[in-house]
């Protein structure tokens, strides 16, 4: 949580975003524990090797 607090308080950022490859439950839990909120799935967002994958988007606003 220190990284996101620094981004908001010291750097003046109003929004942080992160994404995980769909199904990566461990990383999803880490982001949720850090205060990020699940914002949904982006279909076919990233290319890994020769295959497109859905990603799960998380966000945290300075006021969250």
Image (tube, rainbow, N blue to C red):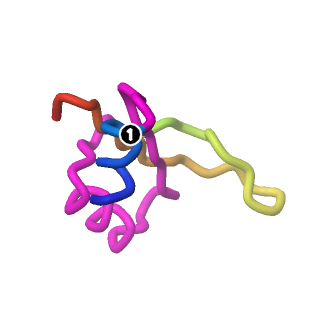
Image check: 49 left or right of 24?
Answer: right
- The residues colored magenta run 11-39
- Residue appearing at x 44%, y 36% in the figure: 11
Residue hosting label 1: 10
Q: How many other residues sit within 10 Å of disc 1, few (<14), some (14-19) or many (≥20)?
A: few
In the image as oriented, which residue stretches furthest toward the right?
50
Q: Is residue 36 above or below residue 15?
A: below
* Quadrant (top left/top right/bottom left/bottom right) for the C terminus: top left
Residue 24: x percent and y percent? 42, 67
Q: Is residue 13 above or below residue 22?
A: above
**Percent x, y of residue 31:** 31, 58
Give the camera-side residue of 11 and 60.
Answer: 11
| 23 to 7, vertically: above or below | below
Residue drawn at the location 41% of the way across and 64% of the way down: 23
Q: Residue at x 34, y 74 (%)?
A: 26
Residue 8 or residue 36, whichever sits in front? 8
Picture coordinates of residue 43, whole percent (x, y): 53, 37
Q: Is residue 23 magenta?
A: yes
Q: Is residue 12 above or below residue 10?
A: above
> Residue at coordinates 38% horizontally, 39% vertically from top-left?
10
Residue 40, image quadrant: top left
In x, y percent, where is residue 18? 46, 47
Q: Quadrant of the N terminus?
A: bottom left
Q: Secondary structure at mark 1?
A: loop
Q: Residue furthest front?
A: 10
């Amino acid at each position: 949580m220190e990284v996101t607090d620094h981004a908001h308080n010291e750097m003046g950022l109003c929004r942080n975003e992160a994404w995980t490859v769909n199904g990566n439950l461990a990383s999803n839990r880490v982001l949720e524990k850090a205060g990020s909120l699940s914002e949904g799935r982006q279909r076919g967002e990233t290319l890994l090797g020769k295959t497109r994958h859905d990603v799960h988007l998380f966000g945290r606003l300075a006021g969250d």
